[in-house]
Image (cartoon, rainbow, N blue to C red):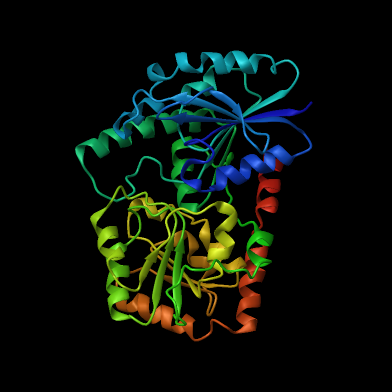
């Protein structure tokens, strides 16, 4: 009997032009020979046109409109009364599959928790990649505490209902095991990489670096969010004017002053959002990948998507305040720092700068990344369901 997979996602497929773990998971399931259909169920501030559309990759996207378009009203995604009626057409759509196919419900964030109780699912899976209830900027406030309680309550319901739970870090696994009251259904699967996409191209995007620049490029690629330490990078940029700091990705900071101030430095370049297919070309502009995260509870749980992408492209990496990545630290491959000290960050980058062209180091980076290919990660996860 073939499977229908429903993936509960944080937003519409092309939101921010970023590709997260859930996108790769959906595409893996879409390609699987036992799959009848993959449905991407997601909230949206505004639904334009049909709530149900077929994407170019064959995945069905089903959108559920938020209470109101403003971000403050997103709490409705976690409270039954604000979305239950809106799910009725979706459940009606699914009932035509119920007798013919196996229905697998995948939560990739704790939205619409009631959905797990509204149908007789064959499997409910929670693929947890973030500490969802914790504020990304690390700041505590009354609204943040209210939000945390609402999201934590929704997540607890999903954890109790789930048959299998996957986590991207040991920190998350420990947290969820405590909530679940058992370790038997909780497994750690770190983020992977589309190895061939990053390892097998040497093409660079043109007209991004300043004319005549031939120095070292330190780069961050991905969503630019408050979890990054902009003040540290600004201090480093002022002390190392011969370096260029390249940021590639959409601004998710909501015009945060610290990011604006960083962009005022003459050796800092920001490209804005780029199509996912173009990311390897930007990767090839970089000499050293940087993951300059702040010290926060949220970042304790993070396993960044970009670590193995940088390594697959042959680039060395410096990561900060990401304990989930510490075990991959190796000379000339990955330098891990538990600090917010700019001089220590600069020192780590200077060490990697000295070996950026060494063929043996490049080979080792690619070898490590190849062992983390997405297809193998998802194949092993699929075996457990």
Instruction: Classify residue 180 as left or right of residue 101.
Output: left
Judge left or right: residue 60 versus residue 274. right
Q: Is residue 40 above or below residue 269?
A: above
Q: Residue placed at 34% from the left, 48% from the top?
A: 136
Camera-side residue: 233 or 363? 233
Q: Is residue 227 left or right of residue 355?
A: left
In which quadrant of the rendered image does the C terminus lie? top right
Q: Position of residue 169 (x, y in %)?
A: 50, 52
Q: Is residue 169 visible?
A: yes
Q: Position of residue 290 (x, y in %)?
A: 44, 68
Q: Is residue 78 visible?
A: no
| Quadrant of the image occupied by residue 372 | bottom right
Residue that lies at the very extreme toward the left in this rendered image: 142
The percent position of residue 37, horizontal first and vertical second, equals: 70, 29
Q: How many marks?
A: 0
Q: Nearer the viewer, residue 245 or 22?
A: 245
Q: Is residue 86 left or right of residue 28?
A: left
Q: Position of residue 384 (x, y in %)?
A: 68, 41
User: The N terminus appears in which quarter of the rendering?
Assistant: top right
* 372 w.r.t. 108: above or below: below
Q: Depth check: give the residue in front, 150 or 205.
A: 205
Q: Which quarter of the figure has residue 126?
A: top right
Q: What residue is rendered at 35% in x and 54% in y? A: 227
Tell me which residue sits at (59%, 27%) in the image. Answer: 53
């Amino acid at each position: 009997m073939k499977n229908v997979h429903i993936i509960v996602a944080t937003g519409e497929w092309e939101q921010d032009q970023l590709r997260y773990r859930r996108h790769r998971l959906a595409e893996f399931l879409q390609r699987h020979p036992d799959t009848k259909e993959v449905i991407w169920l997601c909230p949206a501030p505004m639904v334009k046109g049909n709530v149900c559309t077929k994407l170019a990759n064959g995945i069905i996207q089903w959108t559920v409109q938020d209470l109101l378009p403003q971000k403050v009203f997103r709490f409705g995604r976690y409270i039954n009364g604000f979305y239950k009626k809106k799910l009725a057409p979706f459940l009606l759509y699914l009932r035509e599959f119920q007798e013919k196919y196996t229905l697998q419900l995948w939560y990739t964030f704790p939205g619409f928790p009631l959905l797990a109780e509204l149908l007789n699912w064959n499997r409910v899976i929670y693929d947890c990649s973030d500490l969802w209830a914790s504020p990304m900027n690390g700041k505590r406030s009354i609204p943040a505490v209210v939000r945390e309680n609402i999201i934590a309550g929704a997540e607890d319901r999903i954890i109790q209902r789930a048959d299998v739970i996957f986590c991207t870090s040991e920190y998350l696994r420990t947290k969820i095991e405590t909530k679940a009251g058992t370790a038997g259904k909780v497994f750690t699967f770190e983020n992977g990489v589309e190895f061939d996409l990053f390892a097998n191209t040497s093409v660079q995007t043109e007209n991004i670096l300043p004319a005549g620049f031939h120095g070292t490029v330190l780069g961050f690629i991905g969503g630019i969010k408050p979890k990054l330490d902009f003040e540290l990078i600004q201090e480093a940029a002022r002390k190392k004017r011969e370096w260029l700091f390249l940021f590639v990705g959409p601004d998710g900071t909501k015009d945060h002053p610290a990011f604006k101030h960083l962009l005022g430095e003459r050796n800092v370049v920001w490209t804005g959002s780029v199509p996912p297919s173009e990311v390897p070309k930007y990767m090839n502009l970089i000499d050293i990948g940087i993951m300059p995260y702040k010290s926060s509870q949220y970042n304790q749980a993070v396993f960044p998507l970009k670590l193995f992408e940088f390594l697959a492209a042959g680039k060395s990496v410096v990561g900060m305040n990401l304990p989930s990545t510490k075990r991959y630290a190796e000379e000339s491959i990955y330098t891990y720092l538990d600090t917010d000290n700019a001089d220590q960050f600069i020192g780590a980058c200077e060490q990697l700068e000295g070996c950026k062209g060494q063929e043996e180091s490049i080979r080792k980076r690619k070898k490590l990344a190849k062992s983390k290919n997405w297809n193998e990660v998802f194949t092993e996860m699929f075996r457990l369901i």
